[in-house]
Amino acid sequence: MFRVIFCFLLSISILTTRADVPGGDLCGLRNTTFLPNEQLTYTVYYSVAGVYVNAGTASFTCNLERYNNRPVYHITAEGKTNPSYDWIYKVRDRYESYIDTATMLPQKFITQQTAPRQLSIPPSIPRR
């Protein structure tokens, strides 16, 4: 559930961005969605029987860097469960995107995910 919320927030943040080209604009619009060196941190809650439990954090950072001699936004997203819940489902995920400031096209994507324990559940319908 945490990964679904985390991926949803990441998708929304990327899809709602517009380029901020130094000295110019994209389609007549300037980027007012985010700025370089901006950081957002969310506390993620999980509802258990109507009680909201602090499950972890999701943080997003945006920096202006150069990649292949072009200015790019380096967007980093990190998701972590609280250490007290690691025995149930441990998440230590990191996603990085390099996005061209002029075209808002992705240049590079890096992901680092921790895989939780796999539960062995027998299939309900046998294969034939």
Image (cartoon, grey):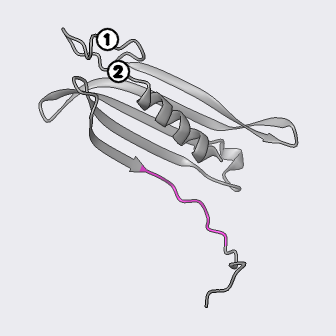
Q: Please name the amino acid that badge 2 sits on.
A: Arg
Residue 8 tag number: none
Which quarter of the image is occupied by the C terminus? bottom right
For residue 96, what is the image quadrant? Answer: top left
For residue 38, what is the image quadrant? Answer: top left
Circle 1 Cα neighbour tier, 10 Å, few/some/many (<14 / 14–19 / ≥20):
few
Q: Please name the amino acid that badge 1 sits on.
A: Leu
Vertical placement of 71 versus 6: above or below? above
Task: Tell me if label 1 and label 2 are in contact, CB under 8 Å.
Answer: yes
Q: Position of residue 98 (x, y in %)?
A: 29, 35
Report the residue that reaches farthest toward the bottom.
Answer: 128
Q: Position of residue 17 (x, y in %)?
A: 39, 23
Q: Is residue 73 left or right of residue 22?
A: right
Q: Nearer the viewer, residue 112 or 24?
A: 24
* Residue depicted at 18% across the width and 8% down the height: 23
For residue 81, what is the image quadrant? Answer: top right
Q: How many marks?
A: 2
Instruction: Tell me the SS state at disc 1.
Output: loop
Task: Report the residue marked by disc 2.
Answer: 18
Vertical placement of 23 versus 55: above or below? above
Task: Report the residue marked by disc 1.
Answer: 29
Q: Is residue 78 left or right of residue 116?
A: left
Residue span colored magenta: 112-119
Report the residue that reaches farthest toward the left.
Answer: 69
